[in-house]
Amino acid sequence: MKRKLFIGSSTEGLSVARKLKEVIDSSCSTWIDVEVWNEGNIFAMNSNTLDSLVWASRRYDYGLLVASNDDLVESRKSVKSAPRDNVLLELGMFWEVWV
């Protein structure tokens, strides 16, 4: 049975996510199915984003999140690049701790 991999990113990181899918498909397609967040029906029109993400985190065996420098964050008078908050949330949803 093939495993399923979800690739998430911001819209700005979508080109990286697509390239990752291409590389994984070319080398691992016999044992893993890869889907980027904007493909298929992950985010259905009749459901909210959070429900769709919860559903995806349970449907896929693995999650790969692209954290690109999309936002600027100012903290303690210093401005730095940071990934989008939604990408960090999605990372947490796919995180599984093995005890």
Image (spheres, rainbow, N blue to C red):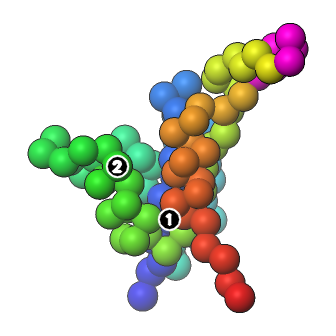
Q: Where is residue 92 in the image (x, y as percent from the top left)?
A: 59, 57
Would residue 56 appear left or right of 48 to someone viewing this image? right
For the C terminus, the image quarter is bottom right
Q: What residue type is labelled 1?
A: Leu
Q: What element carries label 1?
A: strand
Q: Residue at x 57, y 35 (%)?
A: 85
Residue 77 falls within the magenta-colored stretch = yes
Q: What element carries label 2?
A: helix
Residue 88 falls within the magenta-colored stretch = no
Q: Can residue 99 be seen in this view?
A: yes
Would residue 94 appear left or right of 68 to someone viewing this image? left
| Residue where numbered disc 1 is placed | 5
Of the pair 72 and 29, the residue shown nearer to us: 72
Q: Position of residue 58 (x, y in %)?
A: 40, 71
Would residue 63 appear left or right of 56 to someone viewing this image? right
Q: Could you tell me what secondary structure mostly forms the magenta stretch?
A: strand
Q: Residue 50 carries which label?
A: 2
Tag in front: 1 or 2: 2
Of the pair 77 and 28, the residue shown nearer to us: 77
Q: Where is residue 42 in the image (x, y as percent from the top left)?
A: 30, 52
* Magenta-tinted stretch: 76-81
Q: Position of residue 11 (x, y in %)?
A: 48, 28
- The span from disc 1 to disc 2 (Cα, nearest Å) is 19 Å
